[in-house]
Image (cartoon, coloured by chain):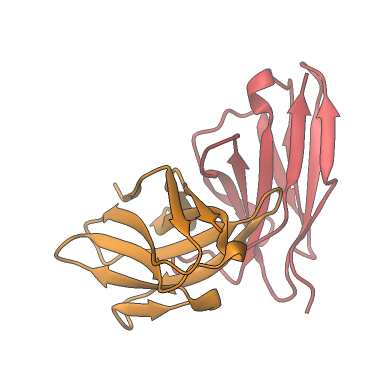
Chain colours: A red, B orange
Amino acid sequence: ETGVTQSPTHLIKTRGQQVTLRCSSQSGHNTVSWYQQALGQGPQFIFQYYREEENGRGNFPPRFSGLQFPNYSSELNVNALELDDSALYLCASSSGGLAGNEQFFGPGTRLTVL
Amino acid sequence: AQSVTQLGSHVSVSEGALVLLRCNYSSSVPPYLFWYVQYPNQGLQLLLKYTSAATLVKGINGFEAEFKKSETSFHLTKPSAHMSDAAEYFCAVSVSFSSASKIIFGSGTRLSIRP
């Protein structure tokens, strides 16, 4: 059974650029959630995708967007990057979007915005 | 609104000593509570979860947590610390909203182990 994988591992961008982060969910999981973890803080929920539709969103601006594909892998896109977007971005997959369903986390993508 | 509060951003214990990491929750309904561990430059690993089946929850690596409704607490303990336990620990609650769910994390407690 393959766990959650994310790519790339690290990424450096400059302000104003756009970035795409990728996540492959664990086998059998149809739900993907994305979190942002700033340095020294706990992860913050960005949004959740279930069967290719965004079904929940946290307090993040529209320049944070996503996609989920038929194989349940997912992308996180961030436009017009700001310095404060520098963080570890974590993807988590689960079987369904119910609270209490265990979310399995990937290793994360470290984004640095200069 | 559901939330968790971790008491103490940094805890230091000697190897072999008891580990106690504190977490209090706020919830108007029976919560789904979790403890995650994060090693440097890695993602999150689930240590244990409470889903109302039993108040004492045993997890991996010798950790356990006790759900106390009267104290709204879910503290994490380990009888004897090992050097490999040094990491960041997050208490979290899973909440439902609209047709989704999200995990709300505490601010984390960094555990250091003294030789």
Where residue A19 sits: x, y (%)? 81, 32
Where residue A12 sits: x, y (%)? 84, 29
Where residue A113 sits: x, y (%)? 76, 23
Q: Residue at x 74, y 64 (%)?
A: A4
A20 vs A61, left or right, is: right
Of residue B78 and residue A16, the one placed in the foreground of this image is: B78
B67 vs A84, left or right, is: left
Q: Residue at x 69, y 57 (%)?
A: A52
Of residue B73 and residue B16, the one placed in the foreground of this image is: B16
Where residue B84 sits: x, y (%)? 62, 64
Q: Quadrant of residue A107?
A: bottom right
* Looking at the image, residue A81 lies above or below residue A55: above
Of residue B80 and residue A41, the one placed in the foreground of this image is: B80
Q: Quadrant of residue B96?
A: bottom left
Q: Residue furthest left?
A: B70
| Quadrant occupied by the N terminus of chain A | bottom right
* Looking at the image, residue B10 lies above or below residue A104: above
Q: Residue at x 47, y 66 (%)?
A: A98
| Quadrant occupied by the C terminus of chain A | top right
Is residue A101 visible from the viewing direction of this image? Answer: no
Is residue A49 visible from the viewing direction of this image? Answer: yes
* Looking at the image, residue B15 lies above or below residue B90: below
